[in-house]
Amino acid sequence: MNKNLPQAIAMVRELLAGDGDVASTIGHALDGAGLLVDPERTFGTVLRRTPQGWAPVAPVTQHVEAEAAEGELIEPTELEQQATDWDAACERARQLADSARTTYRSEPDFVRVRADGDTVVITLQITELSRWAGWMATLGIIEHQLTGLDYVVCGRTTIGDVPVTVLAYDLPEVQLAAQAKARRPYRHAGLIYDLAVGHKDITGDTWFFHGDYSTEGMPLLSTDGRPERCTLAAVVDLLGPILPVREPVAAAQGGEHG
């Protein structure tokens, strides 16, 4: 119960005269409407921006006022430090977005880039798988970081200490076209690989499928006819992106950035 309620009722009772406990009814009505403040109830700390940084909205205590008057350094609270850290993270995201905009705006696939809080969102429109492979290599996206939807593929990575989300539109349609051309299609992490052809990794080696699978059903690949076999997933994660040899490798012209 609101600790102010008895006093509020007493004050109203002194001022009103009438039949029944009108004061109690008024007091409870005010409390139910949230118009009475309970000094023993906490709603958490609310911060506001000041020229010196974040500070609590509530008045400071006499102890803190005395320290401030004496010019002593007041350590920020945990909440104030979290707010300051958030501001710094958002500023890093804004700086990265500005840099990425300058670096990639001439790329034919680039649509836009923006800072969303502490995260950077890059939007692309992909028309060739080789271009997407180039963007993955440039931005450091690997297969298990991809999430595919009906109309867009979402990749998540980190540049410096800034989280980056990459939205690749039209890629599902490009993938469907690749699947239609593939003689032996295999889907892994939302992308289609044609096991009937070799796939070149980022080092220039070409990997081939010879019909063997792991116990989990993952295709096993090898290079240059060597007996050693690696799973498609391992090759993609460690040496990807990999491209079918019938397509030229054309990484984004921006090169390695970050």
Image (tube, rainbow, N blue to C red):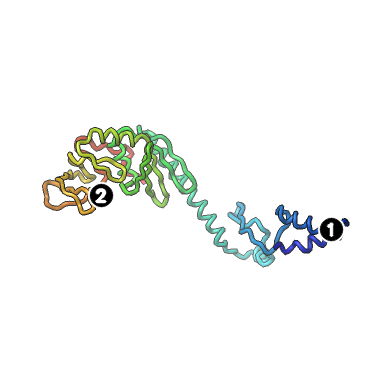
Q: Is residue 128 left or right of residue 165?
A: left
Residue 173 picture location, percent across and down: 33, 33
Q: Amino acid at mark 1?
A: Gly
- Left or right for 229, reference 71: left
- Residue 65 in picture, x, y percent from top left: 67, 63
Callout 1–callout 2 Cβ contact below 8 Å: no
Q: Residues within 10 Å of mark 1 (few under 14, many from 20)?
A: few
Quadrant in which the N terminus is drawn: bottom right
Residue closer to the observer: 181 or 201: 181
Q: CA distance from mark 1 to mark 2?
A: 79 Å
Question: Is residue 48 or residue 215 the one in the foreground?
Answer: 215
Tally the marks.
2
Question: At numbered mark 2, what does the secondary structure look like: helix, strand or loop?
Answer: helix
The percent coordinates of residue 24 (x first, y second) are 79, 59
Q: Amino acid at mark 2?
A: Ala
Residue found at x 87% / y 56%: 18
Q: Nearer the viewer, residue 208 or 118?
A: 208
Please tell me which residue is depicted at 62% across the width and 53% down the height of the picture: 48
**Residue with the mark numbered 2:** 233
Q: Give the mark, 1 or 2, whose residue is nearer the N terminus.
A: 1
Q: Kindly identify the residue that appears in the image at 54 percent across and 55 percent down.
A: 83
Q: Residue pushed farthest bottom? A: 63
Q: Which residue is mark 1?
A: 20
Q: Quadrant of residue 149?
A: top left
Residue 225 shows which numbered tag? none
